[in-house]
Amino acid sequence: MDRTEMNASPVQKALQGIKKYKYVLLTALLGVLLLLLPQNEKAADSGSATPSAAENFDREALQNEMEDILSSLDGVGKLSLMLTVEGGGAYELAQDETASLKARGDEVDEQTRKTETVVLGGGTSAEVVVTHSRYPRFVGALVVCEGGGKADVQLKVTQAVSALTGLSSERISVVKGTP
């Protein structure tokens, strides 16, 4: 140590430390400020603790709802629908990751990481936080309807099923059924 450092007051030492680590301190301060900002409702809802009814995939309920809608199209008549899917629904859970470093001087001696699933509540009321949910992928659709022998009805039904499922027209079959 030189003489000026030995004679420096604690305030001067603190200012030197701030100058040396100013970017680290600014980053930490920004992080604290972001944590203190209130979240809007939309952001809070995206990480809801339990999947909503819209996120729970029920193929039978979806088929019934689509049958009701499609049978109301002009010329379709009585209708049955079967959707095939690949895989099941999936949820991505919120994860909390912590890392710690042990250092001596300029060398890092040890680094540890720990990842845990975020859980709200405790005991019997504990619920995981779902950040994203996915429906299974639709593979094909078969529509059997009274008006299925007519080209205009086939086109309307194919377009409607495609719009609702994201399936291309070659994966949708519309055929004539008996009344």
Image: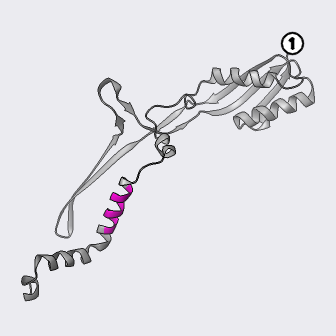
The residue that appears at 30% across and 68% down in the rendered structure is 24
Residue 130, percent from left and from top? 45, 37
Left or right of residue 150: residue 50: left
Q: Which residue is mark 1?
A: 178
The residue that appears at 35% across and 35% down in the rendered structure is 119
Taking depth in this image into account, of 62 and 123 the one nearest to the observer is: 123
Q: Quarter of the image containing the N terminus?
A: bottom left
Left or right of residue 20: residue 13: left
- Within 10 Å of disc 1 (Cα), the crowding (few <14, some 14-19, many 20+) is few
Disc 1, SS: loop
Q: Quarter of the image containing the C terminus?
A: top right
Left or right of residue 153: residue 15: left
Residue 115, percent from left and from top? 33, 44
Query: What kind of secondary structure does the magenta stretch mostly adopt?
Result: helix
The quadrant holding residue 22 is bottom left
Q: Amino acid at mark 1?
A: Thr
The quadrant holding residue 28 is bottom left
45 w.r.t. 9: above or below: above
What segment carries the magenta color?
Answer: 26-34
152 w.r.t. 43: above or below: above
Taking depth in this image into account, of 151 and 46 the one nearest to the observer is: 46
Taking depth in this image into account, of 95 and 34 the one nearest to the observer is: 34
The residue that appears at 73% across and 28% down in the rendered structure is 141
Taking depth in this image into account, of 159 and 174 the one nearest to the observer is: 159
Left or right of residue 112: residue 12: left
Among all residues in the image, which is located at the extreme bottom?
3
59 w.r.t. 46: above or below: above
Asked if the magenta segment contains residue 90, the reply would be: no
Residue 46, percent from left and from top? 50, 41
Residue 60, percent from left and from top? 64, 20
